[in-house]
Structure formats: structure tokens, C-alpha cells
């Protein structure tokens, strides 16, 4: 079964949800109204053999990714973390020392981002390690930025550099070692109105497609403008594909993609705290039957919706 087919089925149930659900399934976080306030929630899993490989990855790095993946979703809403709970299923032969190392590292990383771990559940089983992290967040004065608010003419921006996140160069492997862009999102929200935002987990081609679909628009991206990571250039030398294709399709960049009205686009700085912020394209009305995301490369216009990747379940 395809992940997106199943999610589409879930989204069809959204109209039946009570009014206190203020952000329904289909965004980086959901939200429910609690008293006067919205509480944002996200849950994500790390499975050994799917998202990480414990045979070649240190426990501390696995722990870090389990936390930071969720915090990237908090950044995507321009929210602030409140706290997290963790459910772990450990292989029976995992061992006390490694279990403690895992727990201590998750607590340490969560603490770095002011997201205390305040509960959880532990079980043992005959399968590979599975970590499920639920993070709560609060708007803290900034209206949560959803995927569905883009408008025709909006300029599309991305943070950081994209592509090749799986490759380790000089001891840095982006999909494990990235910094969730929580502070950067808050800084941006103070400078301009963010019409829509998503964090890049499945590749810009597919994730910008989510903004386009939720906003009922299309997007055009200029391949020449894509900020290429060193790892994207490295990946290009390995497989002969253009580096821009890696920037668009590799996934697990955990950077932000957001859209801003054209008359505010000049107020977006070209970098914040050393992290590049780059205009890469525009939103426009969607023609019936046309691709949601098109890449302009080598004088051609290439549909990009299917350049990203997705998980498959059997
Ligand atoms: Mg996300």
C-alpha cells in the first residue's frame, strides 16, 4: 500500500472532526483548541532498517534524529516546542547500556531545544528498534503557518542547502546531524507574513507539491536557483545526475520551504544566523490536469511532482 493513498483516505474523514480541531490531518502538525489556546501535536517514528541503520549508526545519532525530525515539524508551523513523550520498542537483546545511552541522548537533544521529555512507554519485542516521539507545541504569539495558505504570485523560498542528505562528508551526515529550524522560522515570522510553510522531508519536488495541492495552486521552480549542498554535488558525481535533481528529489533535508507575497519578498533576508534563505520559484494558478510543480531546467519545463520519494508498506 502507498503511504499517500492511505493518508488521502484519512484526510477524507476531516470534515467530520469537531470544531475544536483547528488544524486537521494533512499538515506538519495537527492542532486542538484547549481553553483559549491551540495546542499543536505531531508524532513520528524512527524504525531501525527504515529511517536509520543501527549497524552503521551510533545510538546517540539515532536518538538525535528521533527528536529532531519531530522538531522540524514544529519549525514548519513556526511554533515553539512545549514538551515530548516517547514510546520505544526495544529488541530483547538490546542491552541495558545501550538502552540507557538511547534514553540519555534523547533527553539531552530534546533539552537543547527546550522540549523536555515528560513521559513515555517502554516495551521489548522480537523486532528491530522502533522509537515513536510525540511533540506538543504552542503558537506563542505566532499564528501557526499551514501548508494551505499560499496565494497566486507568492515567492517560494527554501532555507539552507538541499540534496544528498544521506551522504556523510567529513563526519557530517545531514539526515542525522541537521538542526531543526525552529529559531529561524520564528525570526522569519517576525519579519514577514508567511503564507504557507512545510519542512522538507520527502524532497522539495514532492513537499512543495503538498503546499501547491493544499493551496489549490501550482508552483514553478528554477533549477538554477536551487541552493545545492556539497553532498548534492557529491551525489551528482556518483550517479551522473544533475546536482539540482538531487536538491529537488533526495529528501530528508529538514529545511523549510515557505511562500511570501511578492510585495514582502524583499524583506526576506538572504541569510539568518549563517543559514541561507533563497528564493527558488513562484506560485501560480493551477491549470486543470497540469503538474502541481514544474522545474525550469536547461530551457525545459519538467514536471517534478514525482521526483521525491515516499515510504512503501507491503
Ligand atoms: Mg513535516
Image (cartoon, rainbow, N blue to C red):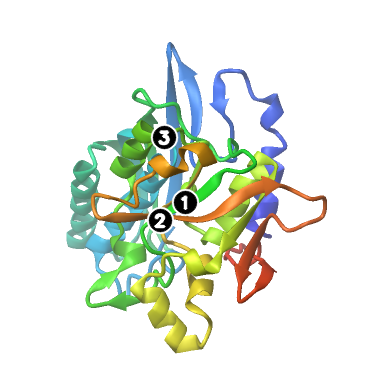
In which quadrant is the N terminus drawn?
Answer: bottom right
Quickly name the residue at label 2. 254
Q: Residues within 10 Å of mark 2 (few under 14, many from 20)?
A: many
Secondary structure at numbered mark 2: loop
Q: Nearer the viewer, mark 2 or mark 1?
A: 1
- Residue at mark 2 to residue at mark 3: CA–CA distance: 21 Å
Q: Nearer the viewer, mark 2 or mark 3?
A: 3
- Residue at mark 3 to residue at mark 1: CA–CA distance: 12 Å
Residue occupying image coordinates x 64% and y 25%: 17
Q: Relative to the observer, which residue lies in front, 115 or 157?
A: 157
Residue 228 in the image: x percent, y percent?
41, 69
Asked whether, in this view, residue 206 is left or right of residue 96, the answer is: right
Residue 280 in the image: x percent, y percent?
50, 57
- Residue 226 visible? The answer is yes
Vertical order, 154 against 298 (above or below):
above
Asked whether, in this view, residue 242 is left or right of residue 59, the answer is: right
Quickly name the residue at label 1. 157
- The mark that comes first in sequence, 2 or 1, is 1
Secondary structure at numbered mark 3: loop
- Residue at mark 2 to residue at mark 1: CA–CA distance: 14 Å
Quickly name the residue at label 3. 192
The label on residue 18 is: none
Amino acid at each position: 500500500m502507498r503511504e499517500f493513498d492511505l493518508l488521502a483516505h484519512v484526510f477524507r474523514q476531516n470534515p467530520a472532526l469537531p470544531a475544536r480541531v483547528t488544524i486537521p490531518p494533512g499538515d506538519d502538525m495537527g492542532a486542538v483548541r484547549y481553553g483559549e489556546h491551540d495546542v499543536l501535536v505531531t508524532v513520528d517514528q524512527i524504525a531501525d532498517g527504515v529511517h536509520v541503520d543501527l549497524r552503521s549508526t551510533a545510538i546517540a545519532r539515532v536518538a538525535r534524529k528521533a527528536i529532531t525530525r519531530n522538531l522540524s515539524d514544529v519549525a514548519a508551523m513556526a511554533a515553539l516546542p512545549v514538551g515530548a513523550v516517547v514510546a520505544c520498542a526495544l529488541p530483547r537483546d538490546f542491552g541495558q547500556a545501550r538502552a540507557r545511552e538511547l534514553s540519555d541522548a534523547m533527553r539531552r537533544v530534546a533539552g537543547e531545544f527546550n522540549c523536555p521529555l515528560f513521559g513515555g512507554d517502554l516495551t521489548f519485542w522480537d523486532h528491530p528498534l522502533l522509537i515513536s516521539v510525540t511533540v506538543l507545541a504552542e503558537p506563542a504569539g505566532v499564528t501557526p503557518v499551514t501548508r494551505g495558505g499560499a496565494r497566486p504570485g507568492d515567492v517560494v523560498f527554501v532555507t539552507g542547502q538541499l540534496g544528498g542528505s544521506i551522504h556523510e562528508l567529513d563526519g557530517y551526515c545531514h539526515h542525522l546531524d541537521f538542526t531543526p529550524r525552529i529559531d529561524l522560522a520564528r525570526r522569519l515570522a517576525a519579519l514577514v507574513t508567511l503564507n504557507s510553510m512545510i519542512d522538507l522531508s520527502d524532497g522539495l519536488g514532492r513537499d512543495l507539491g503538498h503546499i501547491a495541492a493544499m493551496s489549490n495552486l501550482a508552483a514553478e521552480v528554477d533549477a538554477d536557483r536551487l541552493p545545492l549542498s556539497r553532498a548534492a554535488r557529491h551525489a551528482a558525481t556518483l550517479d551522473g545526475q544533475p546536482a539540482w535533481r538531487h536538491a529537488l528529489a533526495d529528501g530528508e533535508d529538514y529545511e523549510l520551504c515557505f511562500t511570501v507575497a511578492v510585495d514582502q519578498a524583499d524583506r526576506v533576508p538572504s541569510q539568518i544566523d549563517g543559514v541561507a534563505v533563497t528564493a527558488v520559484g513562484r506560485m501560480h494558478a493551477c491549470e486543470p490536469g497540469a503538474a502541481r510543480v514544474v522545474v525550469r531546467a536547461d530551457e525545459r519545463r519538467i514536471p517534478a511532482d514525482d521526483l521525491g520519494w515516499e515510504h512503501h508498506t507491503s
